Image (cartoon, rainbow, N blue to C red):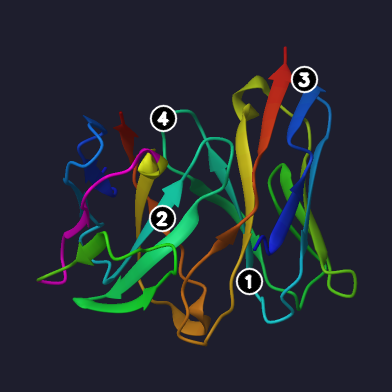
Amino acid sequence: QQQVKQSPQSLIVQKGGISIINCAYENTAFDYFPWYQQFPGKGPALLIAIRPDVSEKKEGRFTISFNKSAKQFSLHIMDSQPGDSATYFCAARTLNTGFQKLVFGTGTRLLVSP
Amino acid sequence: DTGVSQDPRHKITKRGQNVTFRCDPISEHNRLYWYRQTLGQGPEFLTYFQNEAQLEKSRLLSDRFSAERPKGSFSTLEIQRTEQGDSAMYLCASSQPRAGGTDTQYFGPGTRLTVL
């Protein structure tokens, strides 16, 4: 059962453009939403994360927007660079319940063209 | 850089054989996780250890799968009687508990298993 839906599956953006990846979740018990970046041959690496008590979090060129009522969150990559070309995964988990598993989306393959 | 390491990086085996993978977490991390990632999909949780105790297991972890973390340091994941459907990337991650539970899971490079 897929609990986190991610779109689009792939994305091509011109250098300098804005990349936007969207995720939606079903389980209202989720209260921690990280984004991971994965390069070929590497494991996923944490990029940025948000808790639902805020609607936006920004770190450098990366911003998470969070809409609790819609159960949706998105990653925005400003001034996209060729080095950002990777697969991006949204994820979700519940905090403070003793359950540590991350539930991942299906991934978005981003290609930033020079 | 003493990140999470996994061995081997690649394993090709024949259907019905047993395989074992090893994960060495970041040294001060007492939480260790195993995930499985198939092509075009996100990682799927398999199991979680806090120190040597296995605290969570996914229903994906059939009785052919067993994971151990005997001394609370490295961990092994064994698959018995492998099937072609077991072909995937097996990822290990580790974390250190943080206040509020927002500990970051650091992933290793994975072991890619191909079952012929």
Check disc 2 and report its element: helix, strand or loop. Answer: strand
Check disc 1 and report its element: helix, strand or loop. Answer: loop
- Which kind of residue does numbered mark 3 sit on? Lys
Which residue lies under the disc numbered 1? Answer: A32
Residue furthest bottom as drawn: A97
Which numbered mark, 2 or 1, is in the foreground of this view? 2
How busy is the neighbourhood of tag 1: few (under 14 within 10 Å), some, or many (20 plus)? some
Residue furthest left as drawn: B71
Q: Residue at x 47, y 83 (%)?
A: B99
Residue furthest right as drawn: A70
Would you say residue B76 sits in the magenta stretch? yes
Reply above or below: B18 against B115: below
Tell me which chain the residue with mark 4 is part of. Answer: A
- Give the extent of the magenta segment: B71-84
Sequence-wise, the earlier of marks 1 and 4 is: 1
Mark drawn on residue A41: 4
Reply above or below: A32 against B104: below
Q: Residue at x 74, y 75 (%)?
A: A52
Would you say residue A10 sits in the magenta stretch? no
Which residue lies under the disc numbered 3? Answer: A15
Mark drawn on residue B35: 2
Q: Could you tell me which quadrant the C terminus of chain A lies in?
A: top right
